[in-house]
Image: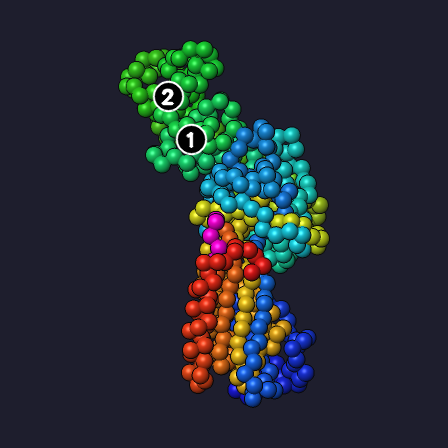
Amino acid sequence: MSETKRHEGRSAEELEGVTLLGNQNTTYKYDYTPEVLETFPNKHPEHDYLVTFDAYEFTSLCVTGDTMIDIATDETVNPDGVPIKDLVGTEGYVFCVDPETLQPLARKYSNVRKTRENVPVVKVIMDVLMRDKEHYNQHRTMTIKCTPDHPFLVRRGFKGSEWVKAKDLKPDMRLVASQRHGDCMRYDKPRHRLVAEAIFDEDLMQVHHIDHNHFNNTPDNLANLSNSEHHHLHRSQDYGYDESLDIDTLVALYEMGENFSSLAKKYNCDVSTIESRIGHLVNKRSQQESLQIQCDMKNFERDQEIMELYQKGYLLSEIADYMQIHSTTVSQAIKHRGGAIRESNYARYHRRTLDLPPLNHKVVAVVDAGCEDVYNMEVEDVENYFANEVIVHNCPKTGQPDFAKVVINYVPNEVMVESKSLKIYLFSFRSRGDFHEDCINTICNDLIALMDPKYIEVKGCFAPRGGIAIFPAVSWANPKFDYEDFRKQRMLDLVRDASNRTVRYDM
């Protein structure tokens, strides 16, 4: 192993002058890549001497304290969410998505904490289409500040997605957004029902807001009631009496698409009872006709929005992508409302002549934003959450600590690891989601394969999360040299010191 190990594709001339100061031709990589490690000859093999590296690793994926997190709360008080810095020390439910299907979910969040102070952050600038009634179809600029490696969920094709780090986002990339309007979000899912699905173990029936505030989705304000119980409560609240078979209410529900059978099921009575009350007041129809009415009522606002966007000049594919539905559904909605479908080539030509803003949360730019304190949180199961209306990852897949100090001690043999390549190699663990013990063993094994040292030990001092700090250590003695007894003694010293260890980051 007397030759310098070279990174694949680089000539001896390029490696000329490699010193402990580092090879300036080496480029930084951010994915786990042991191939980047390089060596140089040990010029003093006659001496047994110890080389120590203290490497400070920052694996956190964090957002700044002013980032608005979409949690289950009273939305009349917190319409845009709650700043993550105000959630420190709290637990609750946060809105997120299934990363495979992009379906919205609510999941429990915990361990909200400040992870670092005064670190470099970037600002992601987005163009956002507003869907609320006061600013319908208006556009505004939205930003989110985070660490450069923080992944965002980016749309790829129809309902596809992938994680892209903030520093790698490009203009016109479309971010997976909440598409919130009223008490609904993506795929027109009611927000209170998503929360209820997460907190109630029993079969979910009707979700009732205890204080009758439809926008107060705090978990202790939601109850799981039967159809009858839910209706009774609202009738009593609205009209001051409890009459489950009020004639006017039954007729109104029937006109909205209910039929005799569904009303009987809703009010836990016989079909004949419903028919005797309103049969002479309504026009009887088949179940299929009732279902069509329900569908038309449910999709009325959606189809109206589709028609308005199409009349402005947006393409069918653009609208489908924005509404999270198939383009065939878009064309059917346009035809159903009397619209004519434009010929494809003309539609695209016409679209290019219009100065129309994008429909989705689209990236405009990513710029440096100085240094700020940053925060993180843990999310059950999916490990993502809505922050400033877009989906971001919360941490590596195992939810590991955000800080680590990696200490490497070794007695060199014929070659030594080049320090800058080691730095680049350790940087690649920033986005590696793995267990602490595996990371430390991986580092040790890679350096053994690289240098064949006489002795090596690697220790990790990981900052505590959830009240537990982890300090894995691994050592190896080359069987060609007499270091086995030394290795055993070193491990005993580590065990003896463990009981007196103080949990600090700078250990």
Residue shown at 42% from the left, 10% from the top: 241
- The question of residue 200 being in magenta is answered with no
Image quadrant holding the C terminus, namely bottom right
- Dot placed on the residue nearer the N-terminal end, 2 or 1: 2
Q: Is residue 475 above or below residue 134?
A: below
Three-letter code, disc 2: Glu
Q: Which residues, given as a range, are shown in magenta?
A: 466-470
Residue shown at 66% from the left, 54% from the top: 119
Assign a secondary structure to mark 2: helix
Dot 2 corresponds to which residue? 229
Q: Is residue 307 above or below residue 16?
A: above
The image shows a total of numbered marks equal to 2
Q: Position of residue 474 (x, y in %)?
A: 45, 69
Mark 2 or 1: in front is 2
Q: In the displayed structure, does residue 363 sit left or right of residue 449?
A: right
Q: Is residue 252 above or below residue 119?
A: above
Q: Is residue 423 above or below residue 412?
A: above
Residue shown at 62% from the left, 84% from the top: 11
Dot 1 corresponds to which residue? 292
Q: In terms of depth relative to the viewer, which is nearer, 45 or 292?
A: 45
Q: Position of residue 172 (x, y in %)?
A: 64, 52
Disc 2 and disc 1: Cα gap in Å? 27 Å
Q: Position of residue 361 (x, y in %)?
A: 61, 46
Q: In terms of depth relative to the viewer, which is nearer, 16 or 403?
A: 403
